[in-house]
Image: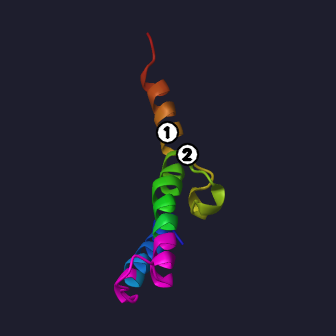
Amino acid sequence: MPAAAAGAIPLLAAGWLFAVGPHLPHLIASIFQVIGLVCFVLAALDILGIVPAIFLYNFPRRFVPPHLRDQPGFLAEARVHDHRGSRKS
């Protein structure tokens, strides 16, 4: 499962838990709101941390699609491309 989709599932769950959970008149959070907040934090960490690492560095390998694991990440590929284009004659 792609990492962005794995991050979207808890994000959607957080929204549903806040919408479906009981609304309490006091400042005490319900268990649904706490679970929704935890799901949102996990989704945010995934989307903001793991997805850019996969795109830029092809790391961690377990989250990179199998057919792309042997290829360099975006930054390594850009670095190789820059070195090839900057030849001095």
Q: Does residue 61 appear left or right of residue 56 in this picture?
A: right
Q: Residue drawn at (49%, 32%), measured in percent from left and top?
A: 79
User: Looking at the figure, which quarter contains the C terminus?
Assistant: top left
Q: Residue drawn at (53%, 38%), measured in percent from left and top?
A: 76
Which residue type does callout 2 highlight?
Tyr
- Between 76 and 21, the residue placed more toward the observer is 21
- Tell me the quarter of the picture where residue 67 sits: bottom right
Q: Is residue 5 above or below residue 61?
A: below
Q: Position of residue 77 (x, y in %)?
A: 50, 39
- The part of the chain drawn in magenta is 18-39
Taking the view exactly as shown, the residue that stands out farthest to the right is 62
* Residue at which label 1 appears: 75
- Between 85 and 22, the residue placed more toward the observer is 22
Which residue type does callout 1 highlight?
Leu
- Whether the magenta-drawn stretch holds residue 13 is answered as no
Determine whether the residue tagged by mark 2 lies in a helix, strand or loop.
helix
Q: Is residue 80 above or below residue 40?
A: above
User: Looking at the figure, which quarter contains the N terminus?
Assistant: bottom right
Determine whether the residue tagged by mark 1 lies in a helix, strand or loop.
helix
- C-beta proximity under 8 Å, tags 2 and 1: yes
- Between 26 and 79, the residue placed more toward the observer is 26
Q: Residue drawn at (40%, 88%), measured in percent from left and top?
A: 21
Q: Position of residue 85 (x, y in %)?
A: 42, 25
Q: Does residue 31 appear left or right of residue 22 in this picture?
A: right
- Between 54 and 69, the residue placed more toward the observer is 54
Q: Is residue 74 above or below residue 43?
A: above
- Whether the magenta-drawn stretch holds residue 23 is answered as yes
Q: Is residue 58 above or below residue 20?
A: above
* Disc ID at residue 57: 2
Taking the view exactly as shown, the residue that stands out farthest to the front is 26
Between disc 2 and disc 1, whose residue precedes?
2
Q: Position of residue 53 (x, y in %)?
A: 53, 50
